[in-house]
């Protein structure tokens, strides 16, 4: 089983939307039985629902994240993930400060999707913003994940090939 972890700060806005998008793309690629996608937050507590605006914009794209509950980063999640996609350089730095052995597996989503032109600052947090702010972030995540899918599919193939 190939495991992908999507990370933001509180695990209630960006990473649940990213997790939902990745699960959708993995399912459309026919790989749901080979890949597990989860999300977590660097400052998350257990059990909080995804933000209402995040649930709304994902639902507009027929992606259901309503049952999502927040989860903090744990050693088990990091050590058990083949690929960790984070929203900002700060998330990457925080993970690597605690789990330096994961360096080759932890990537900022923006630069993972486009190594040459990707925004090194990452994906802005829409928390506290209106529905338009969440739509903007969701559209950015959609573009980034779609751009990253060929690379993700290649990594999955390399890891799960007999």
Image (cartoon, helix red, strand yellow):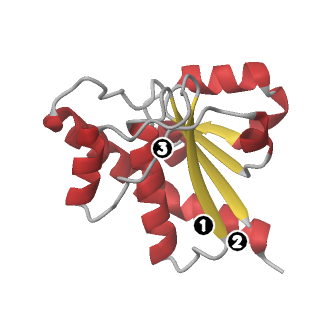
Which disc is residue 69 wearing?
Answer: 3
Which disc is residue 157 wearing?
Answer: 2
Query: Which badge, 3 or 2, comes first in the chain's sequence?
Result: 3
The local crowd at label 1, few if under 14, some if 14 to 19, many if 20 or more residues have their Cα within 10 Å, is some
Residue pictured at 21% horizontal, 26% vertical: 129
Which disc is residue 153 wearing?
Answer: 1
Which one is in front, 52 or 4?
Answer: 52
**Mark 3 → mark 2, Cα distance in angstroms:** 29 Å
- The answer to whether residue 152 is visible is yes
Farthest residue to the front: give it.
Answer: 47
Residue 126 percent location from the top left of the image? 29, 29
Asked if disc 1 and disc 2 are in contact, CB closer than 8 Å, the reply is yes
Which disc is residue 110 wearing?
Answer: none
In the picture, the quarter occupied by the C terminus is bottom right
- For the residue labelled by badge 2, is the local secondary structure a helix, a strand or a loop? helix
Left/right placement of residue 63 relative to residue 101 reads: left
**Mark 3 → mark 1, Cα distance in angstroms:** 26 Å
Depicted 58 relative to depicted 129: above or below: below
The local crowd at label 3, few if under 14, some if 14 to 19, many if 20 or more residues have their Cα within 10 Å, is some
- For the residue labelled by badge 1, is the local secondary structure a helix, a strand or a loop? helix
Residue 37 percent location from the top left of the image? 58, 57
Query: Which badge, 3 or 1, comes first in the chain's sequence?
Result: 3
């Amino acid at each position: 089983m190939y495991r992908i972890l999507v990370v933001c700060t509180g695990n209630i806005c960006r990473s649940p939307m990213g997790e939902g998008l990745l699960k959708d793309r993995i399912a459309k690629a026919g790989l749901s039985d080979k890949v597990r996608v989860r999300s977590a937050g660097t400052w998350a507590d257990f059990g909080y629902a995804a933000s209402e605006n995040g649930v709304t914009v994902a639902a507009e794209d027929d992606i259901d994240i309503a049952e999502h509950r927040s989860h903090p980063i744990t050693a088990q999640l990091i050590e058990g993930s083949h690929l960790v996609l984070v929203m900002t350089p700060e998330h990457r730095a925080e993970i690597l400060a605690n789990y330096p052995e994961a360096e080759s597996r932890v990537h900022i989503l923006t630069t993972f999707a486009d190594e040459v032109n990707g925004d090194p600052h990452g994906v802005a947090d829409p928390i506290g913003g209106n529905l338009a702010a969440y739509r903007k972030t969701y559209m950015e995540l959609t573009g980034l994940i779609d751009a990253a899918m060929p690379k993700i599919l290649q990594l999955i193939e390399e890891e799960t090939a007999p």
